[in-house]
Amino acid sequence: MPDTLADLPLLTLPTAAPATDTTAPRLLILYTGGTIGMVVNTRQELVPMHFSKLDRLVPELRQLPYRLELLTLPQLIDSSNVTPTDWLRLAQLIKQYYSEFDGFVVLHGTDTMAYSAAALSFLLEHLGKPVIFTGAQVPVGRTRSDAARNLLTALEIAAARHPQAHTVQLPEVGLFFDDILIRGNRAKKVESQQFAAFRSENYPPLVRAGINLTFADNDIRLLPSARLKVHERLDENVAVLRLFPGITAAVVEAVLGVPGLRGCVLETYGSGNAPTAPWFLQCLERARQRGVYILNVSQCEEGRVVQGRYETSAHLTNLGVIGGDDITSEAAITKLMFVLGIELDETQTRALLSQDLRGEITPQ
């Protein structure tokens, strides 16, 4: 269980919505750290700053017709230091404030944002409100920063109501960056120098931001029929093994033979192909006998794993390797942590790893 964060103070931000207007959408901004809130220290390094003056840095917030409140984590995180414990804490914060707010915007560093968004999508089962991750490539307040535009649009998406159904427009975890909103467990960071930092190759954007917001209603998950269930455990005994020509038995065994290992994302070639060398098959077989679940994910950014299409992948099925279809590596590793954390029997575990849980896989 994560440590309690129940006593963290909420800061009310001045906006165009009167405090007494209970019809105005009420949104919670969760500031975890990241480039969006960085300043340069005396050594010319980017470090997190105190974000309590957000309305001064982004004066456009004062024009929004929403009720906005800001919650800053007591210890800000460079996203390269994010851990599964941080994901569990974020999920608990959303659980704590779920009934009070209409939507949530999570300010997060870009390096691991796709992992965090995927993890939250699995932890927040039956999510019926928007949880939008966003951040920036250039710190807020700096020349040509993308921070204000990303934040303002993320808030607009979090507040959106369906014009016909009059319900939440986006009841899922999303990642907004550079005018597109991607399903959280479909995102992948692809750029470190350009504003278009994230992409989703196997699923279309859920929202495009131009002069107006355009929602892809047919691609957005439906409102759940059950109440929010927040999971409280992730199993960190997982690994990622990326294949490459010339990989040795020592390398494969070093990964698959880690003491206590329960799951591994195997990044294979093309549509799920891997070597057929006897030593490689023996490594997989030994891992299977130790109860390690292996999830086959393609190294290709676009396309899907189809085990058995070629002879070089048929043997993986025989060894109990689970095909990951078109899941991203980021979603695959967090899904492994989530499913293994539920502690089900082998049949149920394999079934959950194989099927689409939160829109991370496109059904064939």
Image (tube, grey):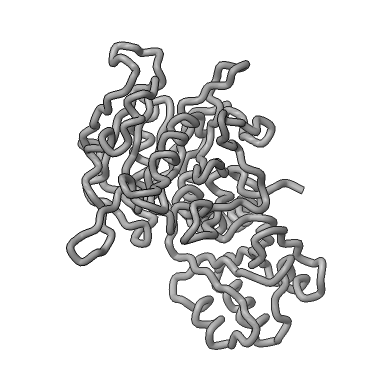
Side of 138 relative to 350 (left or right):
left
Is residue 13 visible to us here? yes
Residue at 72% across, 58% down = 303
Residue 145 in the image, given as x and y percentages of width and height = 39, 48
Return the x and y of residue 52 as percentages of the image width and height. 22, 38
Relative height, residue 363 to residue 285 (above, below): above
Nearer to the camera, 278 or 171: 171
**Does residue 135 appear anywhere in the picture?**
no
Which residue does the image show at 69% across and 56% down from the upper left?
A: 325
Residue 148 in the image: state x and y as whole percent: 39, 40
Number of numbered labels in the structure image: 0
Residue 310 versus residue 32 in the image, above or below: below
Answer with left or right where residue 154 lies relative to residue 276: left
Instruction: Classify residue 247 as left or right of residue 84.
Output: right
Q: Quadrant of residue 271?
A: bottom right
Residue 304 picture location, percent across and down: 71, 59
